Amino acid sequence: MKVTKEHVAAIRDLIEPLDTEETRQRYRDGDFPRAELTRDLNRRYRWDLMWAARANLVLHDADYNDSHIDTALRSVVPPL
């Protein structure tokens, strides 16, 4: 994984409070904006959590692409 352990830990600290069972169930039920357009529910959930937690700000100076970030998010957010 290209994302540093420090960045992953910072992302985890920001996302964990938002990753609740209620939020998970809403996504499983398709109760989120533009759910009908979502092809990969787990990826959508991970990225929505990242944006909601503003975890992207942790990575603002880093040279990571979307694939690197998604790998880090998968290590932080368990599948639905």
Image (tube, rainbow, N blue to C red):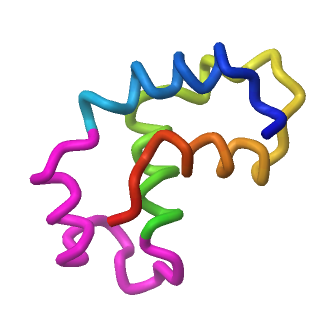
Measured along the vertical axis of the image, is residue 71 above or below residue 40? Answer: above
Residue sitting at x 52%, y 77%: 40
Q: In which quadrant of the rendered view does residue 26 lie?
A: bottom left
Residue sitting at x 67%, y 21%: 5
In front of the other: 36 or 71: 71
Number of numbered discs:
0
Is residue 66 left or right of 79 when viewed as pictured? right
Q: Position of residue 11 (x, y in %)?
A: 52, 25
Is residue 33 left or right of 58 when viewed as pictured? left
- Seen as rendered, the residue at the extreme left is 22
Q: Is residue 32 magenta?
A: yes
Residue sitting at x 79%, y 40%: 1
Measured along the vertical axis of the image, is residue 46 above or below residue 19? Answer: below
Is residue 4 left or right of 13 when viewed as pictured? right
Q: Is residue 57 magenta?
A: no
Measured along the vertical axis of the image, is residue 39 above or below residue 14? Answer: below
Q: Position of residue 68 (x, y in %)?
A: 78, 45
Quadrant of the image for the C terminus? Answer: bottom left
Q: Position of residue 77 (x, y in %)?
A: 43, 47
In front of the other: 39 or 12: 12
Is residue 24 left or right of 6 when viewed as pictured? left
Q: Which span of residues is magenta-colored?
A: 19-41
Q: Position of residue 24 (x, y in %)?
A: 22, 58
- Seen as rendered, the residue at the extreme right is 63
Residue sitting at x 81%, y 16%: 61
Q: In which quadrant of the rendered view does residue 7 lie?
A: top right
Measured along the vertical axis of the image, is residue 15 above or below residue 23? Answer: above
